[in-house]
Image (cartoon, grey):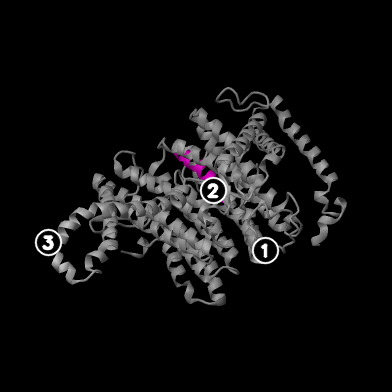
Amino acid sequence: MTLSTLSPGLILVLGGLLLPLLRGRGRDLAVLALPLVTLAAVWAVPEGTAGIVDFLGLAIEPVRGSTLGRLFATVFSIMAFAGGLYAVRHARTLELAAALVYAGSAIGVTFAGDLFTLFIFWEIMAVGSTVVIWAADTDRAYRASIRYLLVHLFGGVVLMFGIAAYVAETGSVTFELMQLEGIGTWLILAGFLVNAGAPPLSAWIADAYPEASPSGTVFLSAFTTKTAVYALLVGFAGSAILIPIGLYMIFYGIVYALLENDMRRILAYSIVNQVGFMVTGIGVGTTMAMNGVAAHAFAHIIYKGLLFMAAGGVLLRTGRRLCTDLGGLFRTMPLTTLFGTIGAISISSFPFTSGFVSKSMISQAAADEHLAIAWFLLTAASAGVFLHAGIKFPWFVFFQKDSGLRPPESPGNMKVAMALFSFLCIFLGVFPAPLYAILPFPVEYVPYTVAHLVSQFQLLLFAGLAFFVMLPMMKRTTTLTLDWDWGYRHLAPRVVHWIGHVGSAAWSSFAAGPRQRYDAVVGGLFRAHGPHGPLARSWPIGSMVFWVAIMLLAYLLLALL
Amino acid sequence: MSDERTLPPDHDHWLVRPRTIRLLWIVFIAILVLTIIPDLFIDQYDHFGIEATFGFFAWFGFLTCVVMVVAAKLLGYLVKRKDSYYDA
């Protein structure tokens, strides 16, 4: 193993682990410098594999440089820097350290040349992000982080089984474009999709992310789902099944965000919506579509980070998170309002913002492939994005009614971080060339035509008209919206409880027969131990063994697959 | 500052005075009209035979948004719960 086979992501992973040793300015400096060092290291990695390491007979490629991986690693580094700048004054060291590990492992995935390396970084990511949520140090956050961890451990197990089966089927551990044949590739796809927030496990995003600290959510918004987008791009580009999955995610995100009252949960649903655009594009799979997905992921991380930064500033200053409690904050938080609005128009793909030059490539790719249903749905969804995130978020937080709150402006470092991302949103929108230059394929797309400008303005502004016309129907209520997670948050605990009741009764009657015979044979011995003999005490152990057996059976069934 | 809400509307921030809001609506509607007019002169891409019709993106954007809001509202009757639902 040589130095070149060490992943650039390790700089942040190790830096994050050592961060708690630093204090004061040294710590702050490390938080800001490590992502920049990583960015330089990312660009120093040459194309192609840096070397193959033999591990248990598997050909491990810890570092493989590619245009696509570099694009994702670049925006992950930028995000780690801006997120660190945003967080550095208010976040706990635990959160900052976990965020660096989390970002580093995401970068590790983008350089992974084999599935084994990918899996290792994938799991570090799950742990790092869980600790980021944990660091909010509230009871709600703790419980949400455990639910989050369970979903991701489940996804990890699925991915691990998939990789094992894939290696057994093909004899190769190389991470490359896969065909959906055989159980291995299907399980790998499912493992990736869990992290993308695909159905039925979409709810973890809106469940867990908004429970993190104001800065924690900024980090969380960037890495997990976009790493999944990267993995899907490499492994499953052109898999048509991703088109309906992506379209479902798009409209799930819109509808749930429209029903939501918590400002950061609105933005969390909107992540699923945006990743849905990317998943759809991956399903289309042409070079135009893949360029669009890569560009959109890059732009998305920046404007979504910006939106969560604005929301975090509001949360930090007001302590409120519900739209029903907020409103009218533009009076005393004009800069946060401005930055939040720039994020909002960027996510809506307004001309001269980053969303305009990236998302339209995905729609264009669908049109070029004559995918009529997909194109009409994507177009409707583009209007829907403006509706659920572009207007709804700034309107209910910064405008609508006067809540009477007069919070001070966001702190200075947060304003600088927001200013940086606002600048990037506009810069990439006006000058898309630098972004287009680092896309995986040569770009033939011209975003700024008169026809495109006119159609986009029509679509968005009339969506805006619909918002204000329909405003009475969108009055916020102090409610949450049930999702598939109702299964594991509400139903499953009750079923387990019920089975515990019925099961122990059934076990008693089932065991009654054998017990009589047993009693007859060893009755004397039994009596020697008195009325509280060992058998009587073994009942709870017996039912526990019963459950262990059930678990082992389930495990065995999974292994046999 | 905090008793601003009890003052007459004209004493509130200029942006939320009724006169400003009326003006904003007028400007907004004027811009909406302006975005449709170019459809008389330019050719849209025409992959599916409908996008090139007059004002397609305007009515399509408006109608689909209305549908999405109504759909969300209807779904809400089914799946909305008090926000303390899971705390119990």
Stretch in magenta: A268-282
Q: CA distance from mark 1 to mark 3?
A: 74 Å
- Residue A484: where, in percent of width, then height? 47, 45
The amino acid pointed to by label 3 is Val
Q: Earlier in the sequence, mark 2 or mark 3?
A: 2
The amino acid pointed to by label 1 is Arg
- Residue A516: where, in percent of width, then height? 18, 57
Count how many numbered circles sit on residues in the image. Answer: 3
Q: Which residue is the site of mark 3?
A: A521
Mark 2 vs mark 3: give the one in front: 3
Q: Residue at x 22, y 68 (%)?
A: A534
Identify whether A430 is placed above or below A417. above
Q: Is residue A38 visible?
A: yes
Secondary structure beneath dot 1 equals helix
Q: Which residue is the site of mark 1?
A: A317
Dot 2: chain letter = A
Dot 3: chain letter = A
In the rendered image, the quadrant that contains the N terminus of chain A is: bottom left
Task: Report the front residue among A309 and A1.
Answer: A309
In the rendered image, the quadrant that contains the C terminus of chain A is: top left
Q: Which residue is the site of mark 2?
A: A271
